[in-house]
Amino acid sequence: MKLFLLLAPVLAAQTVDPRNIKTGWVIPDEGYSDQPYIVKTADGAWLCAITTGPGHEGAGGQHVVTRRSTDRGKTWSEAVDVEPSTGPEASYAVLLKTEFGRVYVFYNHNTDNIRELKGDNPPYRDGKVRRVDSFGHFVYKYSDDHGRTWSAKRYDIPQRDFEIDRKNAYQGKIKFFWTVGRAFSYKGAGYVPLHKVGGFGEGFFTSSEGVTLRSANIHSERDPEKLHWETLPDGDAGLRTPAGGGPIAEEHSYSVLSDGSIFCVYRTIDGHSAFSYSRDGGRTWDAPQYMRFADGQLMKHPRAANFAWRLENGKYLYWFHNHGGRFIREHPRRRSMAYEDRNPVWVSGGVETDSPRGKVIAWSQPEILLYDDDSYIRMSYPDLIEEGGEYYVTETQKDIARVHLLDKSMLESLWNAGRPGDAQVNWTSPPAEIEAPKFPVFTMRSRRSDYGLDDLRAGFSIELRAAIAGAGQVLFDGRTPDGKGLALRVTERASVEITMNDGQTLAAWESDPGTARAGAKPHIVVTVDGGPKIISFVIDGKFNDGGDARQFGWGRFSPQFRSPNGAPRAKLSPGMDLLRVYNRALRTGEAVVLTK
């Protein structure tokens, strides 16, 4: 009993991880729950628009509702229908607040109640698509009472025909499209994102590109019938993938920079997200490129929403998934592998820098923002809200939407990472054998009535620098004769492998191939994070994301794993001149700073 009393405060602190999405506050829904986007109204409330319904995504009864919160997302008012569930499908709403306090909501509406469309065969055996939420009319309603009620009338936004429209199965007479993210304002005009679609087939949408609908008078004109709309960019094509990329460019997210440039990032099926800048209000765009970190390393991202936000401090936050999921046609029972693995969520911090054409954003190495213990759970379609110096995000798993208060210190470290505190073990030029570090316990028997597993969500990092002799070299060996404990070795792929064995469960992962070549002396930080159960490597200041060699640079270990403690003493490789062990999982930024 005495031992439990001593441990209890520690366990309570370790078992609650604010990155775990189950710690968030639920936004109520009707079953299906998508795109929980928020604006702060003129009376100080948060107004959330959400697409919901009693069935799954795309099922009948899908419609748009709004709710208000006056306590930063902890509780919500009763839902207010923007469109009723008994009418034609209404889906995928974004919000814009005008300078005079009116709130507009923009969304897809199947106004003509069309029940099927022409699609490809395969996958649609009869050539008919019966999901009817991604075409029809793009419409808006408005509220002058901060979202408590919505106008009875809805208004159509005319779309200019592009090449992608004229090439669809109806030559543009029926347009295919949807929207996500945020509407935004720029030099007195309002901009609403729209993603034009070319057709339906493998992966559902077979081609897509991004446009914006611009209203020059939305912030001044109070008669909604008199709003003027134009479709940008100029010309016959929207924002597409970089040269040589695939046919999918969608879910465009926009940020206005301090010099008036507009940054746009969007998803593809190429294993990377794409971006572009406009220097003339969205009329023309630079040639699209794939997203990169500030050091030039390509960012990896699947076919999932990836949004960037400009914050009140002038910095940027980028939401993405940090792996290279691509469209794979060889899986006949699955439309696309590229939609998978939206867990965990990673973020990168951005700061503005100068370029010959204007301001651009330089992006930091990635950090984990949110996760779920179930690796198959997918979270996406976020929004970001700042209130009282705090940062909040929304997200959805498609059946549960939540609000999360973020760790402000983690976000600030994205823009200005500091060095970690004192290490538990700190050797320069260590001897060949040392007293083994005391690694944390990850799981233990609970004091609950069922005596089950308590997940302590502990973590650690090992930092070392050593001369690499070649494959098979053991850098660190803290194992017992029967293999229990932790070891680091160099593999035949010139990578560093970590193995952890608790006597019944083995965990292993390795750095990217070529990061530990013979003759080199790399700076290595391996981090074992017991929150999301992820192992990652930062070598010579670069986060290992798998590059071209593998989809994932980070790996998972078993939630049943107990502890990597093994032998009382650990053996070290000759040629090691630095060894530090930290009794917590270092942030990526901290690991990068250690190389400087």
Image (cartoon, rainbow, N blue to C red):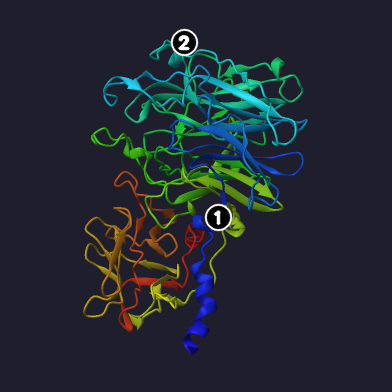
Amino acid type for the residue under numbered disc 2: Lys
Q: Residue 24, labelled with which disc?
A: 1
The amino acid marked with disc number 1 is Gly
> Going by the image, does 345 lie left or right of 375?
right
Rounded to the nearest whole Å, what is the CA distance between mark 1 and mark 2? 44 Å
Residue 173: which disc? 2
Q: Quadrant of residue 204?
A: top left
Residue 365 x/y as whole percent: 48, 51
Query: Extreme front residue here?
Result: 86
Q: Tag 2 or tag 1, which sits nearer the N-term?
A: 1
Q: Position of residue 266 (x, y in %)?
A: 48, 34
Q: Residues within 10 Å of mark 2 (few under 14, many from 20)?
A: few
- Give the structural element (helix, strand or loop) at label 2: loop
| Residue 363 in view in this figure | no
User: 295 above or below 210?
Assistant: below
x and y percentages locating residue 119 in the rendered image: 34, 20
Whether residue 302 is visible to the viewer of this picture, yes or no, is: yes
Residue in the picture at 42% in, 50% down:
343
At horizontal 59% and vertical 34% (from top left) the residue drawn is: 182
Residue 156 sits in quarter? top right
Total number of numbered discs in the rendering:
2
Secondary structure at badge 1 equals loop
Q: Residues within 10 Å of mark 1 (few under 14, many from 20)?
A: many
For the residue pair 421 and 7, the one nearer the viewer reads as: 7
- Residue 97 position within the rendered picture, expressed as x and y whole percent measured from the top left: 70, 33
